[in-house]
Amino acid sequence: MKKDVLIVGGGITGLSLAWELSCLGIQSILIEKAPFIGGHVSQFACKATQTCQRCGACLLEDYLSKLPRTNNIQMLVGSRIDSFSQAGREFNALIMQRRSGVINEKCDDCGLCEKVCPAEGALFKSPLDSSLHISNEKCLKSKGISCEACAQICPQGAIELEEKNRELEIQSSAIALCTGFTPFDASQKPRLGYQRVPGVLTSLELDSLLRAENFQLPQSSDGLKSIAFIQCVGSRDPKSGANYCSQICCGVSIRLARLIKSRHTETRITIFYMDIQTFEREFDKTLDQTKNDMMFVRSMPSEIRSGEDGRPEIIYHGNDDTKQIVPFDLVILSIGISPRDPDLPGSFPALWKNRDGFIGSEGNDVAAGHPGIFVAGAAKGPKSITGCISQSILAASQIKKYLDRIKRGE
Amino acid sequence: MIQGSISQVSGFVGNFDVQIHTPTDRYDEMFGFIIAAQPANQQSKTNAFSLTSSDKIYSLSEFKRFLDSGDRLSENNGTWRHIAFFFDLKGSSDISQFETLLSILDRLEIFHQVQPYIFTRDLKVASAGLEARYRYHRQRGVVFFKFDGPDPQIVQNERGCVIEFVEPLLGEKMELTPDWIVLDEILGPPIDLDPLLKMIPSAPAFAPYLQPESTRFNGAETPKAGVYAVGPARGVFDNESLKADIDAVMVSVLKTLPELSRITEREAAFVDKTKCAFCLTCIRLCPHGAIGFHSRPEVDPLSCKMCGICILECPMGAIQTRSNNADVLEVDSNLFSNGAKTGESGRIKLLVCSRSGLQAAGKINQTLLSDVEICALPCAGSLDPNSLLKFFLDGADGIIVAGCFKGNCASIYGSTLAEERVTQTSKTLKQAGIDPERLEFIYLAGNTPGRIVEAIARLKSRTDN
């Protein structure tokens, strides 16, 4: 199959890039490793109170409803580049597509398979359209155990556990890497208690709980609920390998805090931080208003431990040089954006890696270090949703210029 | 390149009539597109600190020019020079200014006997490389003081300036008498955007900027087709974003050029001249500035975003869409990715904006929608209050109208107009003896299906009793 551009990654960057290219009349094929498109944004909740907080999460739905209107885009889920070669200016990528196991056209969402499945989390739903999928990591069958409970019980015959891989060869003149990021692994900072102290969650976990409309405030003995947000977990921290600001976390935490506060006005919210980064217009005014509703403490906690009453306790260096120990009902670690391995075959050309470990150069250009290969979005460095879309537009413009140059034979 | 300013603009994409003022002349010229790329309006903070101008006090950009003009710092043999920088105090500062500050610190490194101090509230490091550069300078001995409580005071006397402050970590009173004080500036939108803002009726919602602060406006686009806001004009001040904005304009112009020649094929609203009473309501209300006046109101097809607000607001009912005259669109079945079908003659009508509510409805389990009929509106702003009454007369149990959250409407105030119409209609229902709570307006986004589910539950609990 011949396409102008091969887009690797079906998150908000890949989707918006495909859309922008399509508007310029450029044909693309988008491959996504996961069984559904949407990437991280599909886990993010809308942060609107009564007013939109401009987090951009709903832009994913916007693109998903626009994309079927064009014939210029083809999408393959469950796919990765298996091998790669180049002849002149033409790239040749062999794509391996893995079937998800559930034939969604046949599935009527009766829920029987989920009831009989012995492996927790092996059957999971896309947060986007609730379509059902089988996790290759968690399914017993893929671990070599002969379990076919789901396939046997499905009245629609919608589950096919037989692994059916499909290979597809794609020629393209350009490749765009939109492979996104890895959320910082908070367990790398054991003193912050993640997965050790009950009541400590990451901002991403809180976000997806809110998205799934599953979030409930924990019960508190004195009736007053308190939540702490800890900023810069895995950001601005050379010791954990991140000598950079993740750029999005101040906006994420403050938006989440405002959302919770608007729903549960009695909640006490404290934000522990180093420096608050601007994320909206008229920031003096909006930050002042927010500071009326919650407490801001300029201090990075040294430890989070389980208190005597079972609630998490934050220990930090407070004002006037004193040690403070404060209990909270819930502690949210505002985790940063870490680089992600783009999962490319060994035969893929060597790419630039910037100082912070992301693909590409330090600046805002979208060159990836090899002619015809581009990079955009969080794969290139920390970025907000709207930041990713802006860079997709930039990438579309640069890719068009490149394709025009090739056509002219330059 | 012309040295001058624009005083008045009219027209539409592909055909803007621009009045240009030069120092010697005034004339009109036609342009296809207009790009607002003026520099930020920089304001000094000397007044905010109650200072009078002096050769000891510089603004950040002045100090950069001062360094550029020669190395006068090195004239001072044998004694240390102290420079105090004020950043993000008395008004928040921007990433671009922190970048400037870091590049000044880079430059100062060659002078051995210069000690910089940074008095600040929050450092703005949210751009590639800034954190590493900040950390480098801190390790090299630049002193940073961060203030949450009272700002440091600058006292001017005959010998110079004294900074009086409470050292934030230790809580002790301190004084510093630096050789120079450098204040960052307040960055605002360009001051000469008015002629462009005047063309866009929805501009009061986002002025003094030219782009609404909304995720519906990506890149450099404004509500008016063919008018672009680059950098400061849309409230973005750093150089990296500026470069991306310029490419965004190019992409948008490339997308629009072929449309200019296909203009007659486009679906758009049009004004029926036999019905129009020249009240100009449509011109005043079109959020996209898509309606002009040439002996009568005329809709520019390329600028029209098909929101339908003019159709509803026209008191004469003189505006229709070109393709059909229905103000309720068919539901696009593609949007129902889980295959949900809507009840054909539902007891509950769900009127949704096609930019948000339709996607949200597509995520709802179809069993919950079994007796719900979904009608998609191009924008909640095209909601017809008469259709609400008609639905009730035809036997609907309840009606839910769903529009985008405030600040997320692609037509700026479409969902707010819809909410107002629902409130009005509720009053009418009450007078007619119909329970007004059988009609509800909800704000939502494409990813908040729960808000529809809750509204249906509320409605059912009322009508089932």
Image: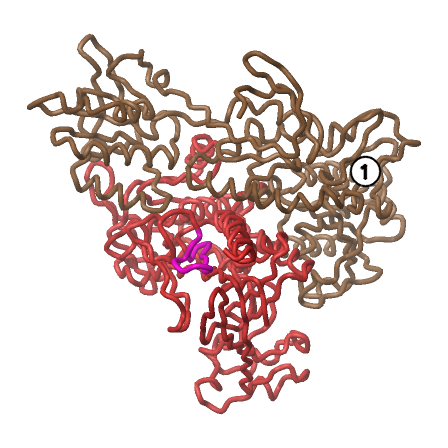
Indicate left or right for A116 with A206 as reference.
Answer: right
Colouring method of the image: by chain
Q: Residue furthest bottom?
A: A146
Q: Which chain is brown?
A: B
Residue B444, percent from left and from top: 63, 48
Residue A162, percent from left and from top: 55, 87
Q: Quadrant of the N terminus of chain A?
A: bottom right
Front-lying residue, A367 or B139: A367
Q: Which image quarter: residue B263? A: top right
Is residue A384 visible to us here? yes
Chain of residue at mark 1: B
Q: Which residue is painted at 16% across and 37% down in the image?
A: B141
At label 1, the amino acid type is Ile
Q: Is residue A12 above or below residue A290?
A: below
Q: Which residue is painted at 65% across and 20% down in the image?
A: B19
Per the image, is B165 magenta? no
Q: Residues within 10 Å of mark 1 (few under 14, many from 20)?
A: many
Chain A, which colour?
red
Q: Which residues are magenta?
A: A366-379
Indicate left or right for A276 with A120 as reference.
Answer: left
Residue B114, percent from left and from top: 15, 28
